[in-house]
Image (tube, grey):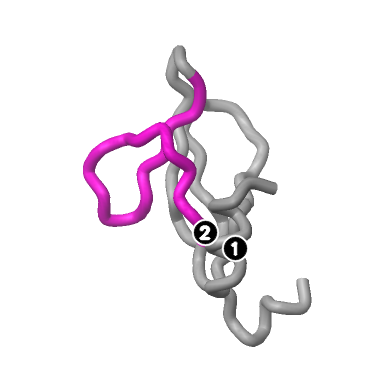
Amino acid sequence: MSWSDEYFMERGYRVRHKYARGRGNTRTCELCGCKRKRFSSGWRYRPKGVAEWHPANPPCARRTKETRDE
């Protein structure tokens, strides 16, 4: 676990996205809607509402009371 993972987890965010398996290079996180796409340099991410693809993996959706026990 990296420092940034710990930082976001302390603030109540999920760090790992949940992407469905399937064909194609664009995936959407089932929890927060963040998209990822395979580029020659690896995965790039586009959080909901952002126009550009970035190599940084953004934190997932804020945890709710119902999902803290998962």
Quadrant of residue 15 within the rendered picture: bottom right
Query: Where does residue 62 sit, x and y in percent of width and height?
Result: 51, 72
Q: Residue at x 44, y 51 (%)?
A: 34
On the rendered structure, is 48 left or right of 60?
left
Residue pushed farthest left? 51
Residue pushed farthest front? 3
Q: Main secondary structure of the magenta part?
A: loop
On the rendered structure, is 39 left or right of 48?
right
Name the foreground residue: 65 vs 15. Answer: 15
Q: Quadrant of the C terminus?
A: bottom right
Badge 2 local density, few (<14 within 10 Å), some, or many (20+)? many
Query: Where does residue 54 sit, x and y in percent of width and height?
Result: 35, 35
Residue contact at pointers 1 and 2, CB within 8 angstroms: yes
Q: Residue at x 53, y 73 (%)?
A: 11
30 drawn magenta = no
Q: Residue at x 63, y 86 (%)?
A: 65
Residue assigned mark 1: 14
* Amino acid type of the residue that numbered disc 1 sits on in the rendered structure: Arg
Q: Which residues make up the magenta segment?
A: 42-60
**Comes first in the chain, label 1 or label 2:** 1
Residue assigned mark 2: 60
* Amino acid type of the residue that numbered disc 2 sits on in the rendered structure: Cys
Q: Residue at x 70, y 78 (%)?
A: 68
Give SS at disc 1: loop
55 drawn magenta = yes
Query: Where does residue 39 sit, x and y in percent of width and height?
Result: 43, 19
Whole-number angstrom distance, CA of label 1 to CA of label 2: 5 Å
In the image, residue 33 above or below residue 36: below
Residue 42 showing in the rendered view: yes
Query: Where does residue 57 sit, x and y in percent of width and height?
Result: 48, 43
Residue 17 showing in the rendered view: no
